[in-house]
Amino acid sequence: MSAKRMIVILSLLGLSVSPAMTQVRIDAALKAVPEKYEGSCPAVIKFSGKIVVSRACNLSYRFVRSDGAKSQTYELFFKEPGDQPVEDEWRLNGDFSGWVAIEVLSPGNVFSNKANFTVKCRRSLTASPIPLKPDLVIESVRVEKVSQEPADTTPVRMKLKMTVSVKNVSGISTANSLTNEGTQRACGGSFKVNLEGMDYPSGTYRQLTSWGVQALEGGQSRTLTYEEWLPWGASRKYRTTADFLDWIAESREGNNSGSAGYGIR
């Protein structure tokens, strides 16, 4: 028997219907700003949209592009029916026509409209060449339980280990592209990576630690680790941000974060 038919029968019998039995309805919409660009390049096209749900749920989504690229997976937490804003951007160095869309991965699989745009660059013979810059990304975030106490009876606490990989996906060293703040604070292209944690689902993020990372050459990466003890069975969510003090001038500034969780269903 289908879930929809079961809900109708329960309603006729005067019985309550559990929220878990009602399928969440999801809508997503996205718009390019501007839709048509003509001017000097590189051009940055921003995408603004929203995701609407019919009931409380945890939702994961990503952005997909006309060139086949896909963003990292993001999460939204809805405590009640409603909508939440989402945004992305695409930096282009030449003439281009394309689109970006929202893909909801769970619950269900929903696509927004395609936010179409066009870019037409005006070229000048006297224009200065555009300097290349580094591009820092959080390549991966992994959380695992590595220990528990006591080990031979019912445990009362556990140790979690976070492993974070940060990478410079550009071909330019971070030492060659410092902001004004970085010129004063960074040592030879070094930067900081921040780690935050929260009790899931009702907590708020607080800083756990920050790592100092030496200059990364183009294509180079670093692996960072952190461990903490928590009560047995706790659920945690972690968020990490590369160059959170903005010492490095990057070609893209909106792709520096990553997240992961433990005990989250």
Image: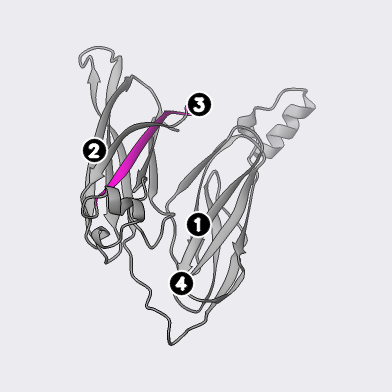
Residues under numbered marks 1 and 4 in contact, where contact means CB atoms less than 8 Å apart = no
Amino acid of disc 3: Ser
Q: Residues within 10 Å of mark 4 (few under 14, many from 20)?
A: some
The answer for how far apart the CA atoms under marks 1 and 4 are is: 21 Å
Q: Indicate yes or no whether the magenta region holds residue 143.
A: no
In the picture of the structure, the residue carrying the numbered disc 3 is 202
Across and down, in percent, residue 27 comes to 65, 50
Q: Which residues are magenta?
A: 190-203
Of the residues shown, which amino acid type is indicated by label 1? Answer: Phe
Viewer-nearest residue: 63 or 32: 32
Dividing the image into 4 quarters, which one contains the C terminus? top left
Which of discs 4 and 2 lies nearer the camera? The answer is: 4
Residue 138 visible in the current orientation: no
Scheme of image coloration? one colour
Mark 2 residue element: strand
Q: What residue is shown with label 4?
A: 42
Residue at mark 2: 225
Do residues under tags 3 and 2 come within 8 Å of each other at their CB atoms?
A: no
Residue drawn at point x = 28 percent, y = 34 percent = 144
In the rendering, at what x and y percent does residue 123 appear? Answer: 48, 84
